[in-house]
Image (cartoon, rainbow, N blue to C red):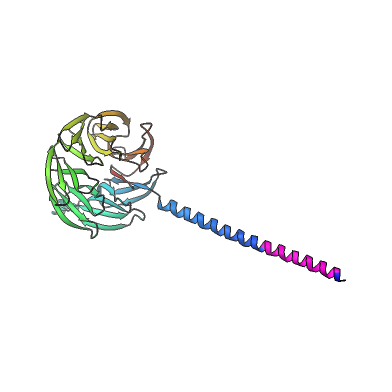
Amino acid sequence: MRKTIIALLTLLTMFMFVLGGCGANSQKNNTTLGENKQAAATKKEQRKETKKYYFVANEGGSISKIDVETNQVVATIKVDGAVHNVQVSPDGKILGATLVPEMQHGNDQSMDMKGMALFYNTETDELIKKVEVGNHPAHIVFTENGKYALVTNNEDNNVSVIDMASYSVIQTIPTGKGPHGFRISKDSRYAYIANMGEDSVSILNLETMKEEKKIKVGSTPVTTGITSDGKTLAVTLNAENALAIVDLASGKVEKVPVGRGPAQVYMDPDDTFAYVAIQGTKDAPSHSVSKINIKTKQVVATIETGKGAHGVVTSPNQKYVFVTNMFDNTVSVIDKEQSKVIKTIQVGEIPNGISVMP
C-alpha cells in the first residue's frame, strides 16, 4: 500500500511539472508573439515615416503629389490660380508653392492682384499658411537652415524674404529685371537669382539682406544651380541655347551648348553632373534633358523626354531624374545609369516646377 501511495505521488509530481512546463512555454510563446507584433508595428511605423513624395506645380490650377517608390499620383491639391513653382523644405515637412491668383474679369484692380506663397503639410496636404508676396511670383526656395523661404517677384524686380517662424514677409530685396529661378548656397548665406529680363544674376547676401553684386552671364538667364562648396554657379541661358558655368572666384564664364530653349537646371549633390531641361517653345517644343559634366564642361548624354521639358530634380537615392513636360502634361522618370526614360506619369495641366522630399 505504501509503495502504491509513493508511486501515485511520484506520478502526481511529474504531472504537475509537465503542466508547469506547458504553462511556461505558453507564456513564453505569448511573450514572443507580443514581441513579434510590436516589432512588426514598429517596422510599419518606420516605413510610414520614411515614405517619400515629389510634388509638381501645375499651372492649370493644382499640385500633383507622387510617391517616389511607385511613381503613382497619390493626391491632387486644387488651387485657384496658376501654380508656377514648388519647393520642399529641408526637413521634408513643408511644401512651398508660388501662386499667381486667378484673374477676376470685370474688376479694374484685377491686374494688380498680389501673388501668394502657399505652405502645405507634406504628409496631410493641408494648407498651413497663405502669405501675400509681390506681383507674378516665380520661384520659391528655402534656406538650408530652414529659417527663411525666398520668393522671386518677376514683375516687381525684387525678392520677398519670408520668416518661417512667423510666416511673414520680413524683407524685400531689389534685384535685376525679371527675377525668376534661383538656388541658395548650402551655408544659407547667398541666393543666386537669374534675372530673365536682362543678362545677369543677382547675388543676394542673406545676412545683410542686400544685393551684394551682379554678374553678367548671358542672354535670358532662367534659373541657377550652385555647387555644394559654393564655388561654381550654373545658369541656363534660354536665348543662347546654352548652360553658363561660372567660376565665382575669378568671374570666368564658360558656355556649354545644349538644345533649343533650356529651362531649369539641377545639380547632383556630388557636384559632378548638371541636368538641364530643354523646353523650346509651345509652337516648337523641345523634348530632352542634357546631362553635363560640370568639371569637363561637356554634354555626356542627351535623354529624350516629353514635349516641353521644364522642371528637373533628382531622387533622394540619386538613381532617378524627374522632369516635367509642360506641353504633354506629364512627368518623365529617367534612370540615371541607363540615361533613358523608364516611366511617364500623367499629371495636371501645364506642369512646371518640381521638387522632391529630401
Identify which residue is drawn at 79% across, 69% down: 9
Q: Quadrant of residue 181?
A: top left
Identify which residue is drawn at 68% across, 61% down: 22
Q: Relative to 60, is 340 on the left or the right?
A: right
The residues colored magenta run 3-22
Q: Is residue 214 above or below residue 81?
A: above
Number of marks present in the image shown: 0
Give how far across and how far down residue 134 sits, in percent. Answer: 16, 52
Asked if residue 13 is among those painted magenta in the image, a careful observer would answer yes
Observer able to see residue 240: no
Front residue of 186 and 118: 186
Give how far across and how far down residue 297 sits, in percent. Answer: 24, 30
Magenta span: predominant SS is: helix
Observer able to see residue 32: yes
Front residue of 25 and 179: 25
Give how far across and how far down residue 101 sits, in percent. Answer: 22, 52
Q: Relative to 269, is 70 on the left or the right?
A: right
Identify which residue is drawn at 23% across, 58% down: 167
Front residue of 222 and 173: 173
Q: Relative to 142, is 202 on the left or the right?
A: left
Give how far across and how far down residue 130 sits, in percent. Answer: 24, 57
Quadrant housing the N terminus: bottom right
Q: Relative to 8, is 197 on the left or the right?
A: left
Asked if residue 6 is among those painted magenta in the image, a careful observer would answer yes
Outermost residue toward the right?
A: 1
Q: Is residue 17 above or below residue 73?
A: below
Identify which residue is drawn at 27% across, 28% down: 299
